[in-house]
Image: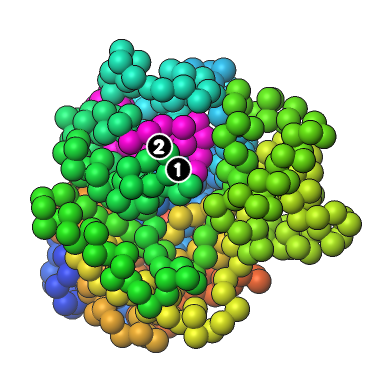
Amino acid sequence: MTFDLILSGGQLLDGTGTPAVDADLGVIGEKIEAVGDLSRAQARRVIPLQGLTVAPGFIDSHTHSEGALLHDPRHAYGLRQGITTEIVGLDGMSWAPLSRPNFQLYARYLGGILGDPPPDLDMSSVAAFRAHYHRKVAVNVAYLVPHGALRLELLGFRDLPLRGETLRTAGRMVRQGIEQGAVGFSTGAAYYPGYWADTRELVGLCGAVREAGGVYVNEPRVGTPGRAFAGGGIQEGLEIARQSGAPVHFAHLRTTEQTAGRLQELTDPIDRAKDQGVDCTMDIYPYPSGSSIAVSFLPGEMQEAGPDAILQRLADTGCQRALRDHLENRLFAPLEPVTFSYLPRNPHLEGKSLAEASRLRGTSPAQTLCDLLLEEELKVGYLNAPPSSRALWEAIDRDCLQLLARPDAMACSDITPLGSAPHPRCYGAFPRFLGRLRRRHPTLRLETMVQRMTDGPARRFGLTRRGRLQRGYFADLVAFDPDTVTDTATYDDPRRFPVGIPWVMVNGQVAVEEGRCTGVLAGQAVP
């Protein structure tokens, strides 16, 4: 037998959580063909990996990369973290299944997070969506049917109830999407038109998720006390899982500046629900603040009818007064931490806080935000600044690792890559866990952490023959130095690649060689 490739001399972590072993890997085509002593075997290429740990390629359970992959399929900021598979369609926000007019409308609305896709793409089905990525991008791509797309296709951009035959049609769309390769269904925290749903609607849709064998991915809702069970949050997600029978996966759970050090308050409801039979998992990224799109700040009455109507209201003096009042007095989250990450028509403001931008413009923060949403035609991405207290940041770091130590948890990045000042998680999430945090807070053994990045998400999302170093599995691999691997991206300088990850393979092809992307586009639409 002649192998296409042998990786020799590395320490292998097979992804299951067992300790590392000294062994070689033999690859033929896309698959791992042998694990063991291959010192006498023949191969077309041998890559020596002495001093490195070899693991399955990391599986990122939460990204917003679907737009960026279409424009830059080489995807260096994902690959160089060791990520070989990304799940997209998160938070109820993506483009399929949508008719062409609705795809173009939703692309405009989501432009602040997903960018501008080619307008002529077929997004009429999950199968069509997947075809745009299969063997055309550098990483494997899995998809979740997004709640917002279903509502837009069936009800338009309107605050209308999804009931009766329309709800049954939505359920059929969920089932069909999963039959065509989606791994589940997603909802978001504060994104329209999905935000207009109530818990009853989501229970109905998750019944279809259960029937089709998918996973319900819930970004816990905020600010919907009249529509959501228990006011939203984790409790709503757990109730949807109880009533529907669908497995639930919570997106990017973490403590905040207000709850740092009180992780048990977050996890106690989950543990009680699991004791009652609810199938629940979660993911976490290792940073103390998040990122999103500013259009989500607008109240429901301003969202009605979609982008054109929103822009008309933003230009109306009376509507602006009402919006300023909402932003200053009734918003579910404070504006003070907002820092702009993506402003395509005002790039000089990227990396500046809302307070800085308002001083430069001589207007109030609320007025500045209104003006920028209008000027940018809603394409405004932002991140929240991290806490100024180092002790508080450290407490959140410890909480992240304690959460990742749970067997029902996994790592994610929540990549939101647009602009010159994106969140540093886009370049550093996985190496930050593996390096900086693991060494500073030795809560998890290396093999346990790798399991949370590989086999755990593969099993949860049904990714066939991925997440382990075993014969017959796809050769998605990462080789890293456990002593030096770390992130270098910061909030002040976020577009910096990590160090200590010299080799990455996707489906048997070398995608990162000696720390440089090769340009190989070997990714597949999975599972």
For this rendering, which residue is in front, 132 or 184? 184
Magenta region:
174-199
Where residue 193 sits: x, y (%)?
A: 50, 31
- Whether residue 370 is situated above or below residue 396 in the rendered picture: above
Q: Report crowding for label 1: few under 14, some 14 to 19, many 20 or more residues within 10 A (C-alpha).
A: some
Secondary element at tag 1: loop
Q: Which residue is mark 1?
A: 224
Quadrant housing the C terminus: top left
Secondary element at tag 2: loop
State whether residue 138 appears in this view. no
Magenta stretch holds residue 251: no
Q: Residue at x 54, y 84 (%)?
A: 390
Q: Residue at x 33, y 29 (%)?
A: 201
Q: Residue at x 65, y 70 (%)?
A: 493
- Whether residue 505 is situated above or below residue 287 in the rendered picture: above
**Relative horizontal placement of residue 407, taking residue 330 as reference (left or right):** left
Q: Which residue is mark 2?
A: 227
Q: Residue at x 16, y 77 (%)?
A: 19
Image quadrant assignment for residue 371: top right
